[in-house]
Amino acid sequence: MNQEHKIEGKEHFHGSDLEKIEKHFGIPKEKITGFGANVNPLGISPRMRAGLADKIDVITSYPDPDYTELRGHIAGYTGCLPEQILVGNGCTELISLFVQIHHPKKALIVTPTYSEYEREVLLAGGTVSHYGLKETSDFRLDIPDFCQQLTDDVDLCIICNPNNPTSTAITPDEMRQILSCCKAHHIFAMIDETYAEFAPDDIRVSSVGLLQEFDNFAILRGISKFFAAPGLRLGYAMTSNLALLNDIKEHKNPWTLNSLADVAGSLMFTDQEYIEQTRQLISSERERIYQELLTWKNIKIYKPYANFILIRILKEGITAYDVFVHAIKQGLMLRDCSTFHGLEDETFFRFCFMMPEKNTELLNCLKEILD
Ligand SMILES: Cc1ncc(COP(=O)(O)O)c(C=O)c1O
């Protein structure tokens, strides 16, 4: 996942590759702003910061194997039922568990997207078929066309919503159509909602409301991005297929979520003020940056629904790597998207929304090279 990719001799860096960047460009990692990591710029929840140290003694016992209290808080936060929740070691463990339990012969993955899904399917011995979002349709999913690809030979369908790296989203109504098609063809759908909480208030993105209607899908989420705590490794899955949940529970190692993360989760999911502040900050920066970039002539942008935006360079002779290098020299680390399946032509890069003044600094920096 975090391995370095080399394309034509150029090194490509992920959001967590700060040590490599430090070595390669000679910039101290403390001086780098992570526009490539998609993490909430407000940092961790103040309620968790204030409360967690006092709970340190929880590590003297095993966590509750059912994580009853934590699941109650997640249910309150998301609107699903506690019995529909399974917690795990980050969204990554849950992706792995759901893929393993389905042991798919053929998985259909909507691309370009997060590479971990494909890796897990291949590790589980399955084959992957890609449904490519079309740049000419601004990477929006064509639902009727996609549904035609949901045939009996597919057993698992994987969608990231909002999608990384396009920041495009599928509405619950559209998802309902997809899940109906999946049901008709006995396909299980895995929907990664790592970025759903960043979506604008007026546009519902999450499929939590469909849990009562369909039992052929699971929603996977984590706290790495919205709650800015990737080191804590807390993820959760929601599904109304309780038989499947039990099956996974029986197969998985117990206590993959440690007792500190268990307690931390209970604190952060109830930090209403921080949750609201995050949503407001991201919404206003997303709108401000989107409106600004719409006026630039040498790029194409795609309407963002998550906490990041995908940009296509239209300026002759400038690649995403050139933009990456220009920005990193000023301590601003964005994501060259050439390693994403479907975006290999080196014209795409992505950045997430940080604090307003840093975002303005990045825009000024990008203007220098893209104007
Ligand atoms: C779409 C998506 N899903 C999952 C993850 C990993 O989540 P976690 O840290 O909860 O395992 C990432 C991380 O970049 C991601 O972009």
Image: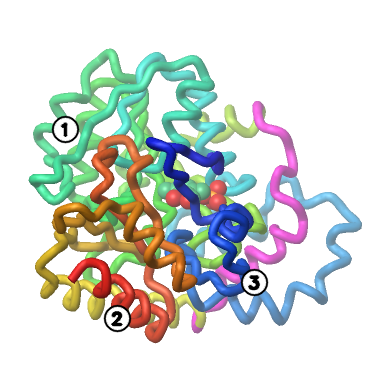
Q: Spatial distance from mark 2 to mark 3, Cα to Cα?
A: 26 Å
Task: State which quarter of the image contains the C terminus.
Answer: bottom left
Give the crowd class for mark 3: few <14, some 14-19, many >=20 residues within 10 Å: many
Q: Residue at x 28, y 56 (%)?
A: 167
Give the crowd class for mark 2: few <14, some 14-19, many >=20 residues within 10 Å: some
Q: Residue at x 53, y 22 (%)?
A: 123
Q: Spatial distance from mark 1 to mark 3, Cα to Cα?
A: 40 Å
Tag 2: residue type?
A: Ser
* Ligand 1 within 8 Å, label 1 CB: no
* Residue that label 1 marks: 146
* Residue that label 3 marks: 267
* Residue that label 2 marks: 284
The magenta stretch spans residue 259: yes
Q: Is residue 160 left or right of residue 134?
A: right
Give the crowd class for mark 1: few <14, some 14-19, many >=20 residues within 10 Å: some
Residue 222 visible in the current orientation:
yes
Residue in the foreground of this view, choosing between 306 and 242:
306
Q: Spatial distance from mark 2 to mark 1, Cα to Cα?
A: 32 Å
Q: Is residue 295 left or right of residue 84?
A: left
Residue in the foreground of this view, choosing between 344 and 352:
344
Q: Residue 135 at x, y = what percent?
A: 14, 45
Q: Residue 215 at x, y = what percent?
A: 37, 36
32 shown above or below 196: below
Q: Residue 347 at x, y = what percent?
A: 24, 49
- Secondary structure under the numbered disc 2 in the rendered image: helix
Q: Nearer the viewer, mark 2 or mark 1?
A: 2
The tag earlier along the polypeptide, 2 or 1, is 1
Residue in the foreground of this view, choosing between 129 and 7:
7
Q: Which residues are magenta?
A: 251-273
